[in-house]
Image (cartoon, rainbow, N blue to C red):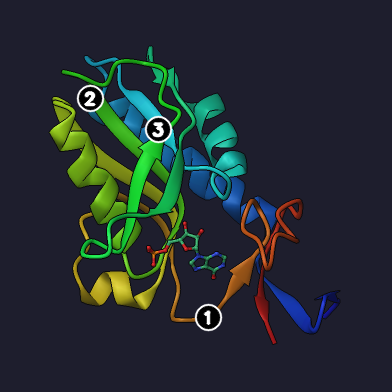
Amino acid sequence: MPTIKIKDLEFKKIITAAKIDEKVMELANQINHDYKDKAPVFLPILNGSFMFASDLMKAVKIPCRVSFVKISSYSGTASTGQLKTLIGHDESLFNQDIIIVEDIVDTGLTLEKIIEELRGLGAKSVEAITLLRKQPAREKKIDVKYVGFDLENEFVLGYGLDYDGLGRNYTDIYTAL
Ligand code: IMP
């Protein structure tokens, strides 16, 4: 099986672009059904979810908005340590049905923090969709309504996901050998 090498690591393909396409259609159809009388705001978390969000949005057929956001980490006061906050949302999120779009949920800490922040902004409803979910998120029963593929604990890249900033451009998903 052909592998790719990025920096010091070698990766093998585990999910093909065709399988991803199929799954994206399936997830979009669920959203088309669940939100048929609503106009949700999709909130893709950059950078990792750009490719997934783009394909998903093309398959979503209900009226909807999209606003790409980032998580900024900055040092807070000595007592609070690292704080993370959502930046870049241009739409008002008050009273909106929000769907957070993630590439991968690992420990779920990032997602939990975002959900808490969105509730604080007065969102009407907050759900999440992720293409990939790792074992720790399943163990912690992190609340993700739409999940593409479940993984164990392996490191993956491609289709938006990176290894040290590299590898986001591949259309398939790879895991380290
Ligand atoms: P969490 O807060 O532990 O759920 O981390 C989620 C974030 O970690 C994702 O949005 C990714 O940016 C990054 N991440 C976690 N696992 C991987 C991986 O296997 N490959 C690339 N990025 C990952």
Residue 109 found in image quarter = bottom left
The three-letter code of the residue at mark 1 reads Glu
Q: Which residue is mark 2?
A: 97
- Please indicate, yes or no, whether residue 144 appears anywhere in the rendered image: no
Vertical side of 42 occupied by 144: above or below: below
Vertical side of 86 occupied by 165: above or below: below
Vertical side of 151 occupied by 27: above or below: above
Mark 1, secondary structure of its residue: loop
Residue at horizontal 27%, vertical 57%?
77
Q: Residue furthest front?
A: 78
Residue 157 spot, x, y in % from top left: 65, 65
The three-letter code of the residue at mark 2 reads Asp
Residue at horizontal 32%, vertical 34%?
99
Residue 125 spot, x, y in % from top left: 16, 31
Viewed as shown, does residue 139 lie left or right of 49? left
Question: What is the spatial separation of the Cα atoms under label 3 and label 1, in whole angstroms?
Answer: 26 Å
Q: Quadrant of the N terminus?
A: bottom right
Does label 1 point to a residue whose CB lies under 8 Å from ligand 1? yes
Q: In this rendered view, identify the residue nearer to me: 67 or 3.
A: 67
Tell me the number on the disc at residue 43: 3
Q: Earlier in the sequence, mark 3 or mark 1?
A: 3
Question: What is the spatial separation of the Cα atoms under label 2 and label 1, in whole angstroms?
Answer: 33 Å
Q: Quadrant of the C terminus?
A: bottom right
Question: What is the spatial separation of the Cα atoms under label 2 and label 3, in whole angstroms?
Answer: 10 Å
- Please indicate, yes or no, whether residue 44 appears anywhere in the rendered image: yes
Mark 2, secondary structure of its residue: strand
Residue at horizontal 31%, vertical 53%?
111
Tell me the number on the disc at residue 154: 1
